[in-house]
Every structure is written in structure tokens, then in C-alpha cells.
Image (cartoon, coloured by chain):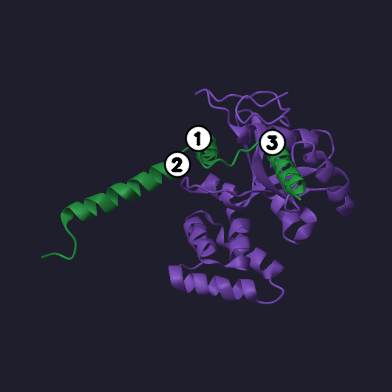
Chain colours: A purple, B green
Amino acid sequence: MQCPSCHSSYWRSPVRRDPRGGLNRFVNLFSILNRMRDEGVIRDWVLFGAVAFLYYEEWRPTRDTDVVVAVGAEADYDQLVRPYLRTFGPERPEGVFTILGLPLQVIPHTDSEMFPGMVRDARLDTVSGERVKIASPEYLVVSALARFSARDIERAVQLLPLLDGRKLLSLVRRHDADGRLRKNLNTLRRRAGFSL
Amino acid sequence: MKLFSERFYRAMEAKEQWREEQRRLPFEEKLRLLDAFLAEEGIFKDPRKEGQEEEEGRDAVGSSG
């Protein structure tokens, strides 16, 4: 079966058109991820990175769609998740799959000590009837503090009004093995002139 | 002369208002805009066709040698 929009032969999801007639690949992507969850390939999934940021802030273009998947065991990512996603399209580079023509970075929750909590505490919402979990602002800011590029700083500053300060400080304390998060948080506080 | 004109401040205010409107858009609408952007950028490629093109490229190299 071919996707009527992108003509991909790997497309096999039921057609979901938005009310304005456009095919929203993201809704179909959520449908696939929910099916993976229902079929036990993954335990859960959560939107992370730039697309999660879109949930809270103004629309801006991005080419990066990142999803963290909670797997039953570490080996499940290689034995179940990657083969499943490869049925939709090629995996390249490693961990980036082409789903409905959309490059999707899929990260197992075992890649960070922060991810299990992020999946557990994520915001739950519905988009066109599909269940969607979105990383909470506090986790997005902690990941921004870890990388701390100019773009990360800008995003973190924009999320400040939405933050639960105590929750953010608790996350920083819990995951700050080398002191980097606290140092970057203090830099952010000075630059943006805020207190928690 | 003022540092910036009244018109400049009005334009800045309108821009801030636009950003706030963008922020308040439903998530689904933001995703629809992103979908349209990625389509325009040519992100949605047929991975099988892409593979075929690579193979054809390799064949062409092979046949020339």
C-alpha cells in the first residue's frame, strides 16, 4: 500500500486526514507508537526535544522529532523496537528511523538515568484521538542545562514561566553527578534574571 | 529624535502579540504547520526510491568500469 501523500511503500497506517484535508504525518506517527505500546513492543513513549518544546511554546520550524521509548529490558530496543521500526523504512544513522517519510530519532529510556522519571511524569494529552505523552517542562529544561547550547538556553528561558521551581531543583540535585547542571542553572539564573 | 519611533514600538508590540498567538495555538495546529514545513523542505522522501537511486548510482559506477 502506498501513502497517498508521500508515496512511500512502507506506509501502512490507516489514513487519518485532518479536518482541513491535509494528512498529518504526526498523528499517524502517534498512532504507530500507540500500536507498538498496545502490542507490547514498548511499554510507553514520550515526545522529547524540539517537538515536545512546540507543545509549550510558539510554533517554529524544526527537522528533529525525538521520542524516548520505555522498553521492558535493555535488549528489547535491539531485538524488538529497531526491527519493528525498520519495517517502515531504513534506519540511518543508527537510532534514526524513517516513518511515513519523517526522520524520527528513537531513544531507549535506558540511555539516561533521567528518562524513566521523564516517561512517568510526562504530560498526557490527545491529538486527533491519539494518546500523546509530552516531556514536562522541568525535564526539557534539565536536558537543555545538560547540553547548554545557545538554542538550549533560549528554549530554557522560554519555558521558565511554566516551570515548577521545586521540581526543577529536585531534578537538578538528583541528576547532577558532575556539578554541570547546577553550574549551568546558575548561569541561566544570572542571564535571565530569575529565581526559583 | 527618539531612539526608536512610535511605529517601531508598535511593530515590536505586534510581533510579541503574534508570538503569543503562536504559543497559544493548539498542539495539533502546531504539528500541522510543522508537517507542512517539512513537506516544503522535501523531508518526506520515499525511502525505497532513495535506496533505488543509490543502487542505480552504484550500477552506473560499476558499468562505467
**Relative to A172, is A58 above or below?**
above
- Furthest toward the front, the residue is B65
Instruction: Please identify, in this view, whether the residue under mark 1 or under mark 2 is nearer the observer.
Output: 1
Q: CA distance from mark 1 to mark 2?
A: 10 Å
Residue A72 visible in the shown view? no
Residue that label 2 marks: B24
Secondary structure of the residue carrying tag 1 is helix
Q: Is residue B42 left or right of residue A86?
A: left
Q: CA distance from mark 3 to mark 2?
A: 39 Å
The quadrant where residue A104 appears: top right
Q: In terms of depth relative to the viewer, which is nearer, A92 or A33?
A: A92
Q: CA distance from mark 1 to mark 3?
A: 30 Å
Q: State the residue at coordinates (77%, 47%).
A: B62
Callout 3: few (<14), some (14-19), or many (20+) C-alpha neighbours within 10 Å?
few
Q: Is residue A147 left or right of residue B56?
A: left
What amino acid is found at the position of numbered circle 2 in the picture?
Arg
Residue B39 visible in the shown view? yes
Chain to which mark 3 belongs: B
Q: Is residue B18 left or right of residue A88?
A: left
**Relative to A74, is A17 above or below?**
above
Judge if badges 1 and 2 mark residues of a common chain: yes
Mark 3 / mark 2, whichever is N-terminal: 2
Q: Disc 1 vs disc 2: Cβ atoms closer than 8 Å?
A: no
Chain to which mark 1 belongs: B
Residue that label 1 marks: B29
Instruction: Please identify, in this view, whether the residue under mark 3 or under mark 2 is nearer the observer.
Output: 3
Residue that label 3 marks: B49
What amino acid is found at the position of numbered circle 3 in the picture?
Lys
**Relative to B16, is B27 above or below?**
above
Q: Disc 1 vs disc 3: Cβ atoms closer than 8 Å?
A: no
What amino acid is found at the position of numbered circle 1 in the picture?
Glu
